Image (tube, rainbow, N blue to C red):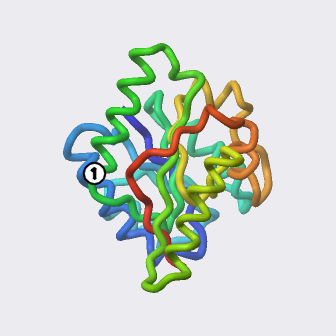
Amino acid sequence: MISVIIATGPTERLLVPTLAALVPGVAQGLVRDVLLVDAGNSEVADIAEAAGCTYLEGPADAGARLRLGAAHARSHWLLFLDAAGLLQEGWSREVRSFIEQVERTGMADRRAATFRLAIDRFGVMPRLRETAAVARHAVTGRPRPEQGLLIHRRFYEAQGGHHGGVRAARGLIARLGRGRLILLRSQILLPD
């Protein structure tokens, strides 16, 4: 049902927990394939092989790697994740519900989704940053790119996909525009 695309970077040590969080979606038949797109790190290739993921070697440009992953994805639904992002319990149920609802209402090519931000630290400051992320989405309609993006391939292609550069994910989110990006209740845990 979905293809998960992760453009890896210098966070390969955080990649194993990220992949482990996808297991419930794989077990439920929600995740069809997982693509790790890297600029040639042999450790990421080894992780991909051990985890049963597809490894793609791409250019150093993050946007080009994301486009490469989307081009090789086998599903109509694409889930772009940060290599250090850890999806929290219940994510697969909510993703399935979102997909079923937008497909039933004919909005698959006009709606995308992202996860709520959770910072992996104790204290007040991380909670304030989480609250600020929700407020930012409410005001601007733009989450942080690290919050992930679930989008139908038609909608992705209609928006021109990821452009080149390190701000490729941010640019795609900006092009999606206010009101077309739904904030799911499920969280994605990110390191501080």
Residue at 53%, 60% (x, y): give it. Answer: 82
Q: Is residue 18 left or right of residue 67?
A: left
Residue at the extreme left of the image, as rendered: 27
Expressed as whole percent of the image width and height from the top left, the position of residue 131 reads 55, 64
Q: Quarter of the image containing the N terminus?
A: top left
Q: Look at mark 1 in the image and give the residue it sits on.
A: 90
Residue at 24%, 51% (x, y): give it. Answer: 24
> Is residue 84 depicted above or below 134 in this figure?
below
Residue at 57%, 45% (x, y): give it. Answer: 69
Q: Is residue 125 left or right of residue 167?
A: left
Residue at the extreme bottom of the image, as rendered: 123
Residue at 43%, 67% (x, y): give it. Answer: 189
> Is residue 66 depicted above or below 131 in this figure?
above
Instruction: Give SS at disc 1.
Output: loop
What amino acid type is highlighted by mark number 1? Gly
Q: Is residue 64 left or right of residue 127?
A: right
